[in-house]
Structure formats: C-alpha cells, structure tokens
Image (cartoon, rainbow, N blue to C red):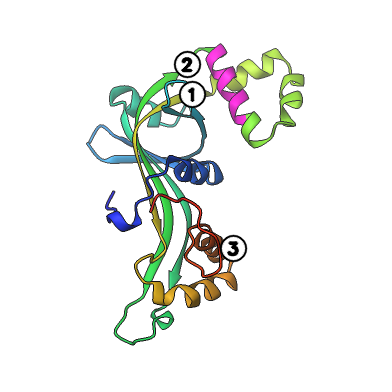
Amino acid sequence: MYLPSRFEARDRAVALQLMRAHPFAALAAVDDEGLPFISQLPMVVQERDDDGLTIWCHCAKPNPLWRHLQARPRARVLFQGPHAYMSPSVYPDLARVPTWNYLSVQCVVDARLVESPDEKDALLKRLISEHEPAYDAQWRALGEEFQQKMLTGIVGLELRVMSLQCAVKLNQHRPEAHAAMHAIYSAGNAQEQALAEWMRACGLVPGVSVQSQGN
C-alpha cells in the first residue's frame, strides 16, 4: 500500500494490537479474470514459534473465494482501524487543506485450505476462544451430527503472513495542530475518540508519556 515513511509503524506489537482490536478484515484474492475478489471475514491472528504470524478464518462453501485462493494462494488482508475526517481549522494558518487520519494493517499472505473435519474443528475452537469462549460448551452440546453438518458448510483458511505494513497516520508531522486535533477527536464519535486515544499513546499530546509506536 502507499505508505509515507513518517506514517509507518515498524513495531510489530502495534500491528498486532490493531489486528486483534479490529478482527473483521478484508481478504482480497485474485479471481479468474485477474481482478480482486474481496470477502470480509472474522479472523484470529496467532504468533508462531518461528516468530511468524498466521491468520485463521473461514468462509462459506458457496463463496468462490476459496477456489480463487486454491488456484492463486498469494493474497492480501486489510485490517482497518479507527479513521476520521480532520478539518483544516486545527491549523493556526489558513493555507491548509482537510485530511483523513487513520490506522490500518495490510498483510501479504500465502493461503492454505483447511478442509479436514479435525482441522476445521480446531480452527473453529480458535475463533470461539477469541470471540466468545463461553459459547464452546453450547457448541459441544449441539452434538456430533450437527457439528459435522456445520463443518461441511465451510472451508477453513490458514493465511501465513509473508510481510505486513502498518499505517498510523495522525498528522505526526504537524505538531502545531495536535492539541486542537486531540480536543476535536476527544469530543467526537467512537472512531474519533479512538484516534484521540492513539494520539495519547503515540505521545502526540503534551503531558502524556510516549509509548513506542515505531514512528
């Protein structure tokens, strides 16, 4: 993705925080015509023993996404964090234009289909553990026949992360506007308030200690 160096977060912990906080991500495969084929799916990110990352998810069997990944395993995943408009009124001078601040993570992945019942069951356990651990007992109580029926209706996906980029765009290069930006975002909607929290975490607000965000 287009990512100016001043907005690139190189600390993987920042990327993991965003990916886990915003797990409903867009998976873009390449279809038979060479065009992007995109599905939004709930995902779980797992750190591997070799210091790599694996993303787990699944799609409905009628979704052609898995067939595209079977034919062309290299794909991209986009995790979209908080984002919001910012008015040029935050600057002390008038020769400014509006902007849009945002946080996101984009991964290049190699996909493997998870098709055996045991592997799909293990994948679902990961998703349940991440999103609603209490549901595990209810899932087990539904019985083997029902579970198998549900498992046949999905195709699991193991996405091994080959590379990633993490964007943290908070107008770091415009310190004269940070106080006004923070005030506006703090009083705004949920997306804007989340950006205000990230401004504090990145040390862009006077009087707040700096946490390492790789910028």
Element type where label 3 sits in the image: helix
* Residue 97 visible within the image: yes
Task: Give how far across and how far down residue 117 sits, in percent.
Answer: 55, 13
For label 1, count other residues whose C-alpha is less than 10 Å away and answer few (under 14), some (14-19) or many (20+): many
Using the rendered view, name the quadrant where residue 141 is placed: top right
For marks 2 and 1 on the same chain, the one whose residue lies earlier in the sequence? 2
**Residue in view at x 39 percent, y 81 percent:** 91
Residue designated by label 3: 190
Element type where label 1 sits in the image: strand
Task: Give how far across and how far down residue 124 sits, in percent.
Answer: 59, 24
Identify the amino acid type marked 2. Glu
Of residues 128 and 200, the one drawn nearer to the viewer in this rendering = 200
**Residue in view at x 70 percent, y 31 percent:** 133
Distance in Å between CA atoms under marks 2 and 3: 39 Å
Quarter of the figure that contains the C terminus: bottom left
Q: Relative to 64, does residue 198 appear above or below in the rendering?
A: below
* Residue 64 visible within the image: no
Residue designated by label 1: 156
Report the span colored magenta: 118-127
Task: Give how far across and how far down residue 114 sits, in percent.
Answer: 46, 19
Residue designated by label 2: 115
Distance in Å between CA atoms under marks 3 and 1: 32 Å
For marks 2 and 3 on the same chain, the one whose residue lies earlier in the sequence? 2
